Image: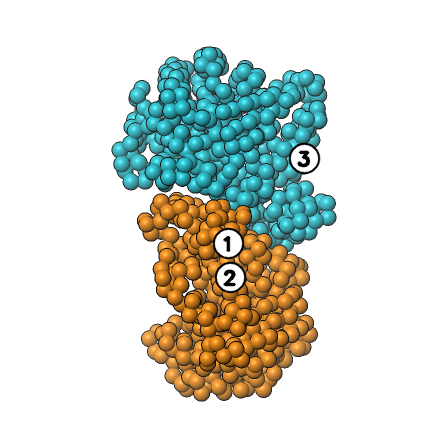
Chain colours: A cyan, B orange
Amino acid sequence: MLQFELLKTDDAQGDYAGSHARRGRLTLNHGVVETPIFMPVGTYGTVKGVLPRSLEEMGAQIILGNTFHLWMRPGQDVMASFGGLHQFEKWSRPILTDSGGFQVWSLGEMRRITEEGVHFASPVNGDKLFMSPEVSMQIQTLLNSDIAMQLDECTPYETKGHITTEREARQSMEMSLRWATRSRDEFQRLQNPNALFGIVQGGMFENLREESLEQLVAMDFPGYAIGGVSVGEPKDEMLRIMAHTPHKLPAHKPRYLMGVGTPEDLVEGVAQGVDMFDCVMPTRNARNGTLFTRFGDLKIRNARHKTDHQPLDPSCTCHACAGASGVAWADGGRDGFSRAYQHHLDRCGEMLGPMLASIHNLHYYLNLMREVREALDGGRFGEFVRQFKADRARGV
Amino acid sequence: MLQFELLKTDDAQGDYAGSHARRGRLTLNHGVVETPIFMPVGTYGTVKGVLPRSLEEMGAQIILGNTFHLWMRPGQDVMASFGGLHQFEKWSRPILTDSGGFQVWSLGEMRRITEEGVHFASPVNGDKLFMSPEVSMQIQTLLNSDIAMQLDECTPYETKGHITTEREARQSMEMSLRWATRSRDEFQRLQNPNALFGIVQGGMFENLREESLEQLVAMDFPGYAIGGVSVGEPKDEMLRIMAHTPHKLPAHKPRYLMGVGTPEDLVEGVAQGVDMFDCVMPTRNARNGTLFTRFGDLKIRNARHKTDHQPLDPSCTCHACAGASGVAWADGGRDGFSRAYQHHLDRCGEMLGPMLASIHNLHYYLNLMREVREALDGGRFGEFVRQFKADRARGV
């Protein structure tokens, strides 16, 4: 089941002329999700480096799981014995699973894509395996994710230096459409009680994106994703597609921009009418010591943090910055962990370093979306965007 | 400051004839510690893999810091700017620091020990450094640990196949006594407001242990440690020293057995009159996938756990085993993480694996000591020891 309530649109407020930003509420089998939302990525049934309860505390409403990875490990038998992913990973709120298409595609030489599906060798044990729209639906049904994604072919931006042509992008997009039909048919046949999203493809070609979108809309999916962005294309190409596609999707259905992106990308995506985002950036960057803050990005490895008693972000209320009290440094709280301490943890290779950094970065993303929602609720999204950009440009 | 109140002794109960077990209460500058107690090891200012708040939740009353490591990184300037270790690592309860002697000694070829102290090359940057009783006291004063340890020379059990002779052990022990005097003098000169422990040495020789003990007792330290065990000697040698020394120490002062050991070692140590233990085993084994449970040790990597829905220990109330509710599986709780899930995390190399395992193992050690204290309070320590051994032998 999926219900989407469109609560407010920014253009009605007039504060940020030209914005397609919207405030919505998504009701799924495992709970309610306020949009716009960022969804932390839990590839192997764990958002890397954080306890589920930390995710709950920082207000994560929905997280991702990766169908391909969970198929490889722990495998369908184990997932089935738990009745799906929720019980296995101890997450009671909604879950979205991708189709596994992107991961199979990423295998490169290890896979062969045909109309029927994708033949590939298991990266875990070399077994010959086959992924198809039907297989993807079967696994996602078993995972019992609140939102399943159709199997699609992720159209590459370039392949070994060759930039994908319109003809190639069309062939790929058209196969994704046929796979959309097969995904939907199998999803229905399995009587999956959750919701299936279609995925708009078409590479960097607006006309193809439009064709893909129109045909998917005709199939009446309960929600739509925009795929094939953030796959190695230049930033301006990504922004061009972000500006083109989202607001053309049906207004009364949720819109999900896959795999995007930086804080700036998210705010821009919201302005373009996107409701849902996912990205590995907050957790991956955390493990590399790159922290997102209101006032720009911070590299904890940098020697200038060695003696700094401030937290990562003085305005932040996450457990890393504000500790048990949750009172931000800027509001007088002194329970958080200092930059000096986190610099030290990083130098010593201590696990607590990436643990605190992951909590902080995920909290930053979730809080950014919370501020976006509040701005939309308050009819001051334009003001918010201006302040956001000024703050981020200020520097830490 | 240090106050030690001896609340109860097992021999007075008569339930476990011959036991020297005692129940005590230690009051330190940062709080009260109920003994017998296990102290988690936080070498570099972090107990590996756990948030300070997790330590608090599992009832850790006092943790360790390593003077040598913290001297190397982050260094004295940073520690001084935080006014000590508590504020740096955000731990408000008591801290004990070792003297750095064991770590300097472990440098092997990299150091030269003289009467004056130890010359060594920094393992971080190669700088030529010097550690002495005075330097150790200066650093520990700066760290502001509730309990500081005298600098001692850790008498090896063997060196390159040569088992330490009585003559060598005597020379080493006598130097440690001279360093005890120098440590005490410097500690007083610095007006350190905390407590300094002397360390009994003497290798595997009871007569030397006795001499060391007598001279340290004459110096009237507020507490005593037994060092130079768990340094590579056979188990029966360790048990021989554990049976010899602890109960000979002054009854009205706390007794600390350094670097020991397995759950069985701890229970045996308590029976021999030890009040305080520390060991890296719970956290180190956690990172290697070896879990301690009431019913024996468990290797999470073992394929038989692949589909097991049970938690690591059905009787355990830690966050890994009992989740947010804290209700053990055996009592009907189903909020904990399964063995299957933790097996999966281990196979995938996910950080959450060692995070959950560290929480569990530390909780196991802390809870074991809590059960020991309750048994002593209830006058049924003998019964407890018999049940403990039967349970551990049962197997998981």
Q: Position of residue B282 (x, y in %)?
A: 46, 60
Say which of marks 3 and 1 sits in front.
Answer: 1
Q: On the image, numbered disc 3 is attached to which residue?
A: A391
Q: What residue type is labelled 1?
A: Cys
Which residue: 65% across, 21% down?
A: A8
The alpha-carbon separation of the residues under discs 3 and 1 comes to 42 Å
The alpha-carbon separation of the residues under discs 2 and 3 comes to 48 Å
Q: Is residue A94 above or below residue B43?
A: above
Say which of marks 2 and 3 sits in front.
Answer: 2
Say yes or no: labels 3 and 1 on the same chain: no
Left or right: A104 in relation to B70: left
Relative to the observer, which residue lies in front, B162 or A75?
A: A75
Q: Are marks 1 and 2 in contact (CB under 8 Å)?
A: yes
Q: What residue type is labelled 2?
A: Asn
Q: Is residue A334 above or below residue B77?
A: above
Relative to the observer, which residue lies in front, B56 or A69?
A: B56
Secondary element under disc 3, as helix, strand or loop, is helix
Secondary element under disc 2, as helix, strand or loop, is helix
Residue A63: which disc? none
Task: Say which chain tag 3 marks.
Answer: A
Q: On the image, numbered disc 2 is attached to which residue?
A: B367
Q: Position of residue A252 (x, y in %)?
A: 56, 17
Q: On the image, numbered disc 1 is attached to which residue?
A: B318
For the question of whether residue B150 can be seen, the reply is no
Disc 1 packing (10 Å; few <14; some 14–19; many ≥20): many
In the rendered picture of this protein, how many numbered marks are placed on residues?
3
Q: Position of residue A136 (x, y in %)?
A: 37, 27
Quadrant containing the C terminus of chain A is top right
